[in-house]
Amino acid sequence: MSSQFGSLFKIATFGESHGPAVGVILDGCPSGLAITEAEIQADLDRRRPGQNRLTTPRKEADTVRILSGVFEGRATGTPIAMVVENTDQRSHDYGDMQTLYRPSHADFTYDLKYGFRDYRGGGRSSARETIGRVAAGAVARKLLREACGTEIVAYVSQVGEIETGIDPLSVSLDAVEASLVRCPDPEASNRMEAAIDAARKDQDSLGGVIQLAIKRPPPAVGEPVFHRVEAELARAFLSLPATKGFEIGSGFAGTRLRGSAHNDVFVNKNGTIGTETNLSGGVQGGITNGEPILCRVAFKPTATVSQPQRTVDKAGHEAVLNAKGRHDPCVLPRAVVLVETMAALVLADLFLEQRARAGLFPVK
Amino acid sequence: MSSQFGSLFKIATFGESHGPAVGVILDGCPSGLAITEAEIQADLDRRRPGQNRLTTPRKEADTVRILSGVFEGRATGTPIAMVVENTDQRSHDYGDMQTLYRPSHADFTYDLKYGFRDYRGGGRSSARETIGRVAAGAVARKLLREACGTEIVAYVSQVGEIETGIDPLSVSLDAVEASLVRCPDPEASNRMEAAIDAARKDQDSLGGVIQLAIKRPPPAVGEPVFHRVEAELARAFLSLPATKGFEIGSGFAGTRLRGSAHNDVFVNKNGTIGTETNLSGGVQGGITNGEPILCRVAFKPTATVSQPQRTVDKAGHEAVLNAKGRHDPCVLPRAVVLVETMAALVLADLFLEQRARAGLFPVK
Amino acid sequence: MSSQFGSLFKIATFGESHGPAVGVILDGCPSGLAITEAEIQADLDRRRPGQNRLTTPRKEADTVRILSGVFEGRATGTPIAMVVENTDQRSHDYGDMQTLYRPSHADFTYDLKYGFRDYRGGGRSSARETIGRVAAGAVARKLLREACGTEIVAYVSQVGEIETGIDPLSVSLDAVEASLVRCPDPEASNRMEAAIDAARKDQDSLGGVIQLAIKRPPPAVGEPVFHRVEAELARAFLSLPATKGFEIGSGFAGTRLRGSAHNDVFVNKNGTIGTETNLSGGVQGGITNGEPILCRVAFKPTATVSQPQRTVDKAGHEAVLNAKGRHDPCVLPRAVVLVETMAALVLADLFLEQRARAGLFPVK
Amino acid sequence: MSSQFGSLFKIATFGESHGPAVGVILDGCPSGLAITEAEIQADLDRRRPGQNRLTTPRKEADTVRILSGVFEGRATGTPIAMVVENTDQRSHDYGDMQTLYRPSHADFTYDLKYGFRDYRGGGRSSARETIGRVAAGAVARKLLREACGTEIVAYVSQVGEIETGIDPLSVSLDAVEASLVRCPDPEASNRMEAAIDAARKDQDSLGGVIQLAIKRPPPAVGEPVFHRVEAELARAFLSLPATKGFEIGSGFAGTRLRGSAHNDVFVNKNGTIGTETNLSGGVQGGITNGEPILCRVAFKPTATVSQPQRTVDKAGHEAVLNAKGRHDPCVLPRAVVLVETMAALVLADLFLEQRARAGLFPVK
């Protein structure tokens, strides 16, 4: 089990769905950064269950408490511990979850790896695990905004078969938050909403894609050959529950182009070197070139569905699972902030690493 | 610059395209594993330039020399250094490459990050960098085969618009190697070959997709929440030059399914718990479940094309680049072994981590 | 600021002297290990202030609460978060501590490094920081005892000029705990106690040495060339507040011997290979040889003394500091469990690393 | 086996005593630093065997070759691989070394850990392993000198019972190199030389102590709570073969002082805050305060002695070992550069880490 992430901007998360609390220690935040619980709470509220009728009815205030590392409103440079108490841990009957393996969940593999598991609400494999990430990510986002003016906006670009073709660089956080589904295209948003409602009525679930746009990313960050920006982003996103794919810039579609059409021509943009097109997605040779970072993350349909499903128990006996629990018919709306979170954590880390060596021995 | 990869099965690579040598130090190989230079050479030969008319005409024997860590044919448990001398470093005129930024290459970002660069043949951003990875990957592959019977086979499943629909689990290494393009579907292979020839004739290039199938992966490996198998694989593949996307199991296509259709039902397979379908791609909750691992990696069309291209020089002045150099019109055939390599490195590392704690305190 | 320690048995600590809480996340504990809050509390109680008249009068129950990672009395393999609330944070006037640099404290260097500091009670540089270590160390100690029968016992062997010559291998935990000073030699203990009383009366402080003996350490652990057992132990001990030196086996005294007298002759001990003497201190070539590990750690006299001291303020103006606060005239008695803690953390980590590769490919 | 060291200024070493070569990959050197093979060779020559009649008669030129990472005389920011071929690998009869365990060597523990070993000349446990460290350390030293004006000088301060009381801050590299023993006190140097000659004549060996003084270290470096400067130095030095102890500042002797005598009073030194005395050894709270770093490292007497010694073979049968081989009767003179090397590697690493976050969000 490894719940540590980052080399210089380092987080360690903890917590199970039905334990006393979840949280994070953030180690390596530069001193002097202004931090308030309110800023962190704002991101947590975007992840919180029970936000609206599209999300799980689990009711959690998810109120964050900073235990260390902030003094007189500023990061001291010491570890910042942030904790959220779990309040809605229904002591219901876990019967089926305890004995049967839920299809496409982590029950079986956790038993295989650890010998037993905390079966209450998925334990560590519950998406409540991501609360610690979001809290630390809010600090990373603040750091990047203050230091580089970086703006990180994600949104739901596809639910099931419904897609939006909106320009990612035209999307604002406000437009995203104005949609229940977190799709800033009102027409697509309405159709996605209807599709999610329909799936829930059918005791079923939907997947989709989240699009991310990062404007004014810190330039020159990324550490080839292994810690390329796209490699670190891919790992970060694929560490989120339910993710199945990642693409940057032209992605899978770009594999169908010829090089002459795919290459981004360098141009002089008012004294700064930039590219005419951005099929590279803001990264070349694993290093940010100053153009916006554009990428997409695929989420599978929620594994928990209310209809009966065939499965086996620990002994391998066949059985039928009737999931109770509370769950989202589509995780995408609540996952938007998770994608932003992971991007912020990756970029903050690479930004600090770049600072470590930059400008020491200039070559004329 | 970070050229270290892995936590327990650790590699550090080095080397530039036109420097004296490239190579790797592999640290953490379990002692006792039988290793020969011939086995490593076999994988290097699959990556080597000049294999056939589809690849770059650069002529390199890429002969590996083991400098340490192997005694009487076995790994001693100490670092294994492996070096390949560069032999075909033409001292030609690098004129344009030295002064102009090649579109969609790393020239600009390396200058931005490091202040200057070794412009000869791309320096560190050349794909020759991957030689060290392949040498270490050959050892990882041997380790997994000996310890777990793991078989790792990748192949070219798409070039430009041409795809094969062959079942990944039906593909053998021999069938892959029988194709110049490394596509085991003869009909598709022929069409891909023709497409690559056409692109070269047009002074252009092609991209595509590599499909990976891993049979009998070590079970119970993967370290949630951050070091999930899919996260580590995604990072590993996206650290390869020219990659733009990754998907596992159902991937992006799976986002269009409903949960009831997407879930993999658990079944009893002759006393072992397995899944009826494998849309999960062999991984659940970030941990291998024993089913084959299935994933795909997107490669953009080669950035180097022979036709003239607009660009700028270091001062931002517009110019026209006429690339000379030697290059592949399509990197996919030579990248097959790279995908296998990174998968082997990831799994060997996670396998050792799983061993570290497994079975210590069994729960009845 | 880096408050993470360990590669496989990993801890991340947090907390300031006068913040809301201190604690730790332990990541990598093998699943199945039985853990109770009571066992952890036992070690915390040995570190706790206000144990007896020799220690600081600060009153803290230091009650630990496990927030995650333990289910039905056993480690689940997921991160174990443990928190201790700070209860005795007197809101007194910090005047002098806020503006003046206490000699041989971290006030000046924290300002130099971080630009400002939490001056209340030393903030992060307070020894309360070690609470998280002790909580995690209690788990490490349990792991080693259960898996290898390892017994870790430290004691105060010197205070100021007073030393004991007792055989470290003859010392039991009970004998240590029977002494207020934690010196198991009653005669020396009495003299140390008197010396500490005298120092306090003189508004002064004392330093000393802690001796550590580890019986039945896990054999074959230690990862040359850099992660040798003695290197990891040295780093671990020197990361404790107030430490100034480390020696293993014959240590500094052994530098005066000739090789023929210093070498530990190998002998057959009832079928097991061991050494006749143990000037190596249980480690050869950086790897445990099965003999007891013996080492010593030097602690400087407490920097906080009640008598007036010359110093400067942040602007560099000379001033006289009159320390108030509560402090130990000699930290040694409370540091005994810290030395044991760090040894346990190091050995648990190296033990897991050794398990990762051991026995995979036996050489006949 | 872990032969990687450092977090940002990272090295990976390789090589056995009687294999083809030894060397290092240095990853993370800031681009633009001027580097020549001659500068690296200078440090290697100070480590080299056969320098004078006091050292082992093994003849090795130890000529370094840079394989990557340097272009037009400057570091490119990519990995710097440096290799030294082994030339004097006598194919003599290893009989005894192959079958018998040399007392206080690593033969037994390597067999215990790895199942077998390269017995030729000690294999990886040979001090030839340190060549890679020295090559990388020469770059670290250059970096610190160029960036901070740091000067790192070590010398032999004790051999057996003979000590010098010279002031470490008065010692120059030239004075050290003027002595065969590398003791800058001519009188003590002569006596040490005679003692080493006598030990060799007696087929015996001597240990001793190396004193290190670092002037103008980078200030504000060190990452509490675990990566304190003294912790990282202790680990670095104790990773060197034959080391048994470490102390910084007042060290073990300081444990006998009272706090009032031990504390370093802060004073204003021409506008800069410094300390009147330096019993802290340049480090407070784990962070450099700008004063010189002063520490000492204990080396045991060479384990290899020519006289017959009792031991056992792999099966545990008693035997008598008659060591042949070539060895130093006292390793101290050649270890001086090793101590400097490790100090440089630690400080370069911590210096880069400090740069990563420094000055980002100044607090007024």
Image (cartoon, coloured by chain):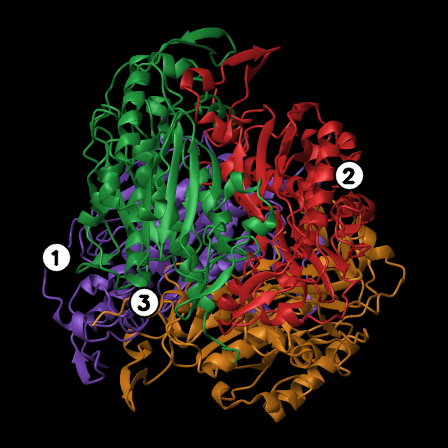
Chain colours: A red, B green, C orange, D purple
Which residue is disc 3 drawn over? C360
Residue under numbered circle 1: D90
Q: CA distance from mark 2 to mark 1?
A: 77 Å
x, y percentage for residue A100? 58, 68
Above or below residue D67? Residue B116 is above
Residue type at numbered disc 2: Leu
Which residue is identified by label 2? A180
Task: Judge if badges 3 and 1 mark residues of a common chain.
Answer: no
Question: Quick check: do tags 2 and 1 share a chain?
Answer: no
Q: CA distance from mark 3 to mark 1?
A: 33 Å
- The amino acid type found where label 3 is placed reads Leu
* Quarter in which the C terminus of chain D is drawn: top right
Question: Dot 3, how many residues are within 10 Å of its Cα: few (below 14), some (14-19), or many (20+)?
Answer: some
Which is closer to the viewer, label 2 or label 1?
Answer: 2
At label 1, which amino acid type do we have?
Answer: Arg
The residue lying toward the viewer, choosing from A320 and B88, is: A320
In the rendered structure, the residue with mark 3 lies on which chain? C
A137 vs D271, nearest the viewer: A137
Q: Are marks 2 and 3 in contact (CB under 8 Å)?
A: no
Q: Quick one: label 2, few (<14), some, or many (20+) residues within 10 Å?
A: some
Q: Nearer the viewer, mark 3 or mark 1?
A: 3
The answer to whether residue B213 shows anywhere in this view is yes
Q: Secondary structure at mark 3?
A: loop
Question: C6 or A64, which lies in front?
Answer: A64
For marks 2 and 3, give the CA distance: 53 Å
